[in-house]
Amino acid sequence: MAPPPPPPHATVFEPYPDSFKFPDDHDDYDNNNHDDDDDDDLKLSSDTLLALQSVLQEKEAVQKKFAELHRLAEERYAAVSMDVFEEDWQQSQFWYSPSTANSLSLLLLSHLPPHSTIALLSAPTVYVHLRQLRSQGKIDPTIKLRLLEYDRRFEVFGDEFVFYDFASPVKGIPEELRGKCDRVLADPPFLEENCHTKASQTVRYLTKPWDLSTPPEERSKIMLCTGERMRELLMKLYKDAGLRITDFKVRHQKCLANPYLCYSTWEDKEFMRFVEDDEVEPV
């Protein structure tokens, strides 16, 4: 019985004819020579090796810095620095300039009574600067600092770090902070409505009830550093808290394309005052 024909479009392989002969130079393809070619391909230029070595050394140096930072962070009054924390643009991180971090820190500390709590919402630059001031004995030791931040690199700061994801406004925030924060500085990571709306829920959770009939000294003080284009939304979200635009100039270590403003529920004669819409000069 004859075998069935191949299916349509099938490829039929015919054996090599008896007259077929491999090229004479087929020895060039033996395993030894092929391995030599691979070895040549794997050889790195001296420049590439130096670059690789530099990357590995830099990585090792960062690991050592974090190990030292972790040791220092366990000492609540030890001085720390932002040098080891590189900005991550994918997380929309843009560090304040040293002068801005210092001024914002002094604003938060101004007329702050003992045993108060300061919450920094997505503002690690100011948190680290406040720690520096504390290490210099410039902050009452009874004042509590709390950093609410998505970037887990800041977990090195132990119980002063609270993991925060604006998508879940109050999830994971300790009950002990609810309505207990006397000063809140927020710099939500994204300039869009959903992010700021949810961040406002976090701020409301952290602060005392928003009631403008309450004496100013009994209210929590709120400050936001964010884009000028968010001001209409912020005026609605924080209307009950008395948020207004100020003349404080927010500057970053690297220039940003988006104009920035500082919004606040209080003004300070030394550092900032409220301004009207026609006086606004975003940085």
Image (cartoon, rainbow, N blue to C red):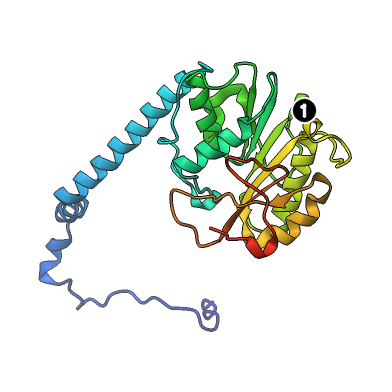
> Residue at image x 52%, y 76%?
3
Q: Which quadrant holds residue 203? A: top right
**Numbered disc total:** 1
- Decide if residue 147 is in sight here: no
Query: At label 1, which amino acid type do we have?
Result: Lys
> Residue at image x 66%, y 46%?
224
* The furthest residue to the right: 213
Nearer-the-camera pick, 154 or 36:
154
Q: Is residue 67 above or below residue 45?
A: above
Of the 4 image quadrants, the one containing the N terminus is: bottom right
Q: Is residue 23 above or below residue 116?
A: below
Residue 240 x, y percent position in the rendering: 84, 47
> Residue at image x 36%, y 77%?
14
Answer few, some or many: residues within 10 Å of disc 1's Cα (few below 14, many 20 plus, some between 14 and 19): some
Please state if 183 lies on the left or on the right of 53 as rendered: right
Q: Which quadrant holds residue 164? A: top right
Residue 100 x, y percent position in the rendering: 50, 43
* The furthest residue to the left: 24
Please state if 19 lies on the left or on the right of 249 as rendered: left
- Decide if residue 68 is in sight here: yes
* The furthest residue to the front: 269
Disc 1 element: loop
Nearer-the-camera pick, 136 or 31:
136
Residue on which the image places disc 1: 180
